[in-house]
Amino acid sequence: MNPWDVEMVVAEEACRHAEAVASINPYSEAEWIAIGNTRCVYAGSSASVFGVYSFQESQWEEREWKELERFFQQKERPPTFWVTSQTPADLLERISTSHRCTKIERIYGIGFAKEAPPSTKTQSPTGEPLTETMDGKTFHALPLADLDRWTLLFSQRDNPSAKEPSYLASVKLHQKEIRFYENGKEASYTFFSNGFAYVPYPAASLRDWQITQAKNFRATAYLERQITNDLPLGSESQKNIAPLKPELKQKDFELILERKLYEPI
């Protein structure tokens, strides 16, 4: 798997999130722009989905920097940058004068054989038969009646006592190119883009189901995000990153991409 392609999938998921926010609240000013392969994303004044994604192209011209700066100035929020091993040294040097690394994410994945057979029918862990069809826009793995349960379970990931859907869960209901999964205990979703099946918020009890459907949709690979806690000031220690979970090792997951979030000092 090419790390550049994987970062583009993460960037596209952020763009679809901003579009979903804009569809819910036109006054949010949520939007994204492309500068070459780079994506500048704004999803709200305090949104966690924010910043410069796929920051991987070399030979940036001054006019491109001005375009980037203008976008975030209009939003009245200084940019953050997601940096990867593909980010050229000159770009990293430029942002390091005003930004520091505060968080590290790792994307793990497994590739699939191209000859994976398609499937037209599957069954959820709750025993509900589901028809697998792709309309090219939104993929619903649950009957609409179950989406209320999904939003609450997804909200309880961060707040186990939640009785109402979180804003993030509500936004995801309006996001394109995703399928929803829940089994009465946990909730997750898969974002499909450019042949990849990407799971930003994995749930252990749903993983096999999501992997199976990714294969059935002829995805070339299944990806999961692992998030670290915020890093101490000036620290980028690998000790802040949890080791690969045993259940992922058993499934032959590999580290595909390490992403570092640089925020203003």
Image: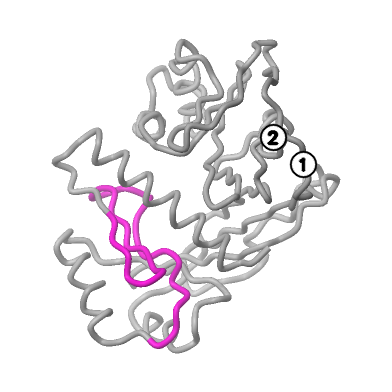
Q: Residue at x 22, y 74 (%)?
A: 67
Q: Nearer the viewer, residue 219 or 207?
A: 219
Would you say residue 8 sits in the magenta stretch? no
Q: Residues within 10 Å of mark 1 (few under 14, many from 20)?
A: some
Quickly name the residue at label 1. Answer: 116
Q: Secondary structure at mark 2?
A: helix
Q: Residue at x 44, y 84 (%)?
A: 58
Circle 1: residue type? Ala
In the drawing, does residue 127 fall left or right of residue 31?
right
Circle 2: residue type? Asn
Q: Residues within 10 Å of mark 2 (few under 14, many from 20)?
A: some
Label 2 to label 1, Cα distance in Å?
7 Å
Quickly name the residue at label 2. Answer: 216
Tell me residue 35's x, y (percent): 32, 70
Which portion, as a residue range, is magenta? 32-59
Query: Mark 2 touching mark 1, by CB under 8 A?
Result: yes
State which tag comes first along the sequence, 2 or 1. 1
In the drawing, does residue 207 fall left or right of residue 21?
right
